[in-house]
Amino acid sequence: MTKRITLTLTIALLMGTLTTYANDGDTTAVQRDKKPKPKKEKSEVRTGWTFGILPSIAYDADKGFQFGVLSNVYNFGDGSIYPDYFHSLYFEAAYTTKRSGLFRFAYDSKYLIPEHHLKIDLSYLPDALCDFYGYNGYQSVYNGGWAKKKSEEYISRAFYKSQRDLLRIAADIDGKIGGNWFWNAGLGLLWYNIAPVNIDMINKGKKPENMLPYVDGMYDKYVKWGIISPAEANGGWHPYLRGGITFDSRDRQQNTKRGMNADVFLTYYAGFGEDKNANSLIFNANFRHFVPVYKDIITFAYRLAAQMNVAGDAPFYLNNYYNNLFIQRVLYEGLGGGNTCRGILRHRITAKSYAFANVEFRFQICKFDIGKEHFFIGLNPFVDMGLVLQPYRLDQNAIIANIQQNDPEFNLDDLSEYIVFDDTRNVYRPHFSGGLGLKLMMNDNFVLSVDWAVPFDKRDNDGMANIYVKMGYMF
């Protein structure tokens, strides 16, 4: 099979950073952390309101041109808690010419409610070409040539895609138990709309030679073959409740230099819509450790994490949603992609339960000021790993029976090109990747992140590299 070489290219245009200031006033609040903070030089402390704006332009052959803007607004008050802030408001809006994008508002404060950390998130995330590679990682065969137009084996660029629209409403809060221990609670609502790729929409305005063919993709086959049940095939409404505990000894939330942050929590999802019985209980555990190696210039950081379905039967799209106590990025998806295993294809590892690890060194290369704003540039070499803990049970006989009934034109001799049944060790084989990150930070909070990563096994992405342009550190 012809090897596929793919380069994911993101073109980001940084137009500049705009800052505004308000009078320092007498903004006050009760601090969550009573420990004395290191004394800073007056010139290093930010006060009042400040915000950064980042226009961006991106292009994808199927999604089209993306136009968007994001902004993070901070209120540092009188500067007494800097680099912590009294309030943070995050806005992001981006859309492509092929109806894929994001619309998000997030509010974050440790001081609006005394002694409590409050986070509110409102997001709508349409995705006309959402990745779908099958179940259980390496047990699902990835044939890169099927999605590469110049390959002799080409089927469709949308073969490993489906349509997914997600609406999220979330509110999370924590309170202090004592010392570095905190309780957590949250509630929210997820609405998923899942469907085959809308080929007519993707083809609209394209030249005939660039149009996508009308063929079944991997998602369509999983539905026909009964691997994806009719009840979960089109999504649904999922209100949820969450509770857990956290240990947090970090010196700061962003650009952490030292300390630990660990949490364990349970999330109960209810099911509405077609999949009314999709009630499930999900357990999550995360451990993040930040070790200073040399002053504040070099930090060793790592994260160990696991998500397990402990009761009920969550639909596949909820298993691809990685739960977090406090939402920092637009979307956490596991496993694979820029939020869990960089360089590995997004959703490459879809399973009922999984674990992953991220290990990196954070180097501060240089510091500089522009006006009243404080900047630094950093480099982050890293290695990521993910593995399946609880796979989906793929019954070969049942799948063959469904194919004979619902997809009679399919040649059963080709089934091994999709699923590996005779070597279950593939299910539990770890997935590794590595790369290098570049960070531009303003005022120890506003972080522009660019990560370049490659998989160690070509079955995870037979391309040369993936590039991720995001806000904030991954953890």
Image: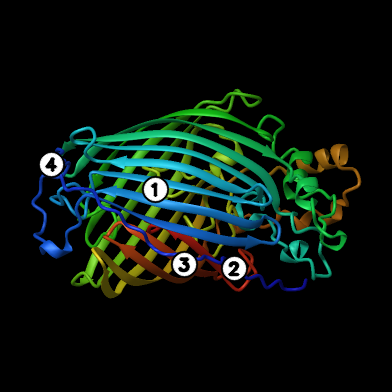
Residue depth check, mark 4 versus mark 2: number of the one nearer the observer: 4
| Quadrant of the snapshot with the N terminus | bottom right
Mark 2 is on which residue type? Leu
| Quadrant of the snapshot with the C terminus | bottom left
Q: Check disc 1 and report its element: helix, strand or loop.
A: loop
**Mark drawn on residue 451:** 3
In the foreground, 28 or 311: 28
In the foreground, 36 or 73: 73
Q: Is residue 347 visible?
A: yes
The alpha-carbon separation of the residues under discs 4 and 2 comes to 47 Å
**Dot 2: within a 10 Å radius of its alpha carbon, few (fewer than 14), some, or many (20 or more) residues?**
few
Q: Position of residue 418 (x, y in %)?
A: 74, 55
Q: What residue is shown with label 4?
A: 26
In the foreground, 325 or 203: 203
Q: In the visual, does 78 lie left or right of 128?
A: left
The alpha-carbon separation of the residues under discs 2 and 3 comes to 12 Å
Q: What residue is shown with label 1?
A: 328
Q: Position of residue 455 (x, y in %)?
A: 55, 68
Q: What residue is shown with label 2?
A: 9
Q: In the rendered structure, are the residues bearing label 3 and label 4 in contact, judged by CB atoms less than 8 Å apart? A: no
Q: Is residue 396 visible?
A: no
Q: In the rendered structure, are the residues bearing label 4 and label 2 in contact, judged by CB atoms less than 8 Å apart? A: no
The alpha-carbon separation of the residues under discs 3 and 4 comes to 40 Å
Q: What's the residue at 77%, 50% (across, down)?
A: 217
